[in-house]
């Protein structure tokens, strides 16, 4: 009995310019309106689920930052600060919520606000940041799905099953 390893003949992923051309629109749509990138590639269930989670996190964050204000001083959302890497990194993470970040930055960050005044505001800012980070992760996942790299993240046995399904019967 010989233990021959099956030869995997999986499709090669898109590379360089072809990958960018195929993926930039869905990724941009995903950043604009979280869930829209999945909708664009036909994964409507994921799009609805992710959009729902994003809305809940943003609403909870806004409510907690609004009603957690002390003496009318709002704060919580990180905004980029020249020369300070930690607030800028937090702003990049929160920026994943898309153009809505501008509204959050205006209302709860920037000049005239303090980073965090209460624990409630910190929870609110964390909800918004997690929504942004989740959207960035979805953008990376979209890249893998569109370019064909997702297959190589699967365990070997699942890759073998996909390869078997792609083989053309010899006649």
Image (cartoon, rainbow, N blue to C red):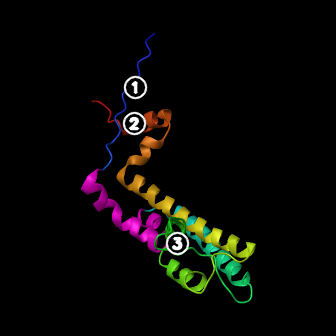
Q: Position of residue 47 (x, y in %)?
A: 52, 66
**Residue 14 at what x, y percent from top left?**
30, 50
Rate crowding at label 2 as few (under 14), some (14 to 19) or many (20 or more) other CA atoms within 10 Å: some
Check disc 1 and report its element: helix, strand or loop: loop
Name the residue rendered at 54%, 63% in the picture.
133
* Secondary structure, magenta segment, majority class: helix
For the residues marked 3 and 2, what is the alpha-carbon distance in whole angstroms?
Answer: 37 Å
Q: Nearer the viewer, residue 86 or 3?
A: 86
Earlier-in-chain disc, 2 versus 1 = 1
Report the span colored magenta: 15-41
Identify which residue is drawn at 42% across, 41% down: 152
Q: Which mark is residue 6?
A: 1
> In the depicted view, which residue is nearer to us: 152 or 40?
152
Mark 2 and mark 1: Cα distance apart in space: 9 Å
Separation of marks 1 and 3 at Cα, in angstroms: 44 Å
Residue 12, quarter of picture: top left
Label disc, if present, on residue 97 of the rendered structure: 3
| Left or right of residue 28, residue 90 in this image | right
In terms of secondary structure, where does tag 2 sit?
helix
The reply to whether the magenta stretch includes residue 132 is no
Q: Measured from the top left, where is residue 99 in percent x and y?
A: 47, 78
Residue 48 visible: no
Q: Is residue 164 visible?
A: yes
Q: Which residue is mark 2?
A: 163
For residue 163, which quarter of the picture?
top left
On whether residue 32 falls in the magenta region, the answer is: yes
Q: Are marks 2 and 1 in contact (CB under 8 Å)?
A: yes
Instruction: Say left or right for 125 vs 88.
Output: right
Element marked by disc 3: helix
- In the rendered structure, the answer to whether residue 16 lies left or right of residue 29 reads left
């Amino acid at each position: 009995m010989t233990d021959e390893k099956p030869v995997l003949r999986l499709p090669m992923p898109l590379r360089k310019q072809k990958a960018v051309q195929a993926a930039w629109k869905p990724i941009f749509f995903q950043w604009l309106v979280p869930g829209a990138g999945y909708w664009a590639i036909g994964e409507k269930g994921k799009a609805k689920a992710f959009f729902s989670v994003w809305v809940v996190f943003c609403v909870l964050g806004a409510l907690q930052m609004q009603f957690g204000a002390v003496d009318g001083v709002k704060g919580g959302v990180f905004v980029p600060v020249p020369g300070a890497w930690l607030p800028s990194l937090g702003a990049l993470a929160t920026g994943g919520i898309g153009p809505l970040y501008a509204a959050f930055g205006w209302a709860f960050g920037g000049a005239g606000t303090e980073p965090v005044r209460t624990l409630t505001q910190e929870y609110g800012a964390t909800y918004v940041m997690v929504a942004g980070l989740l959207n960035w992760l979805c953008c990376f996942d979209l890249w893998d799905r569109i370019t064909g790299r997702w297959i190589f993240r699967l365990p070997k046995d699942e890759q073998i099953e996909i390869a078997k399904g792609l083989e053309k019967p010899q006649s």
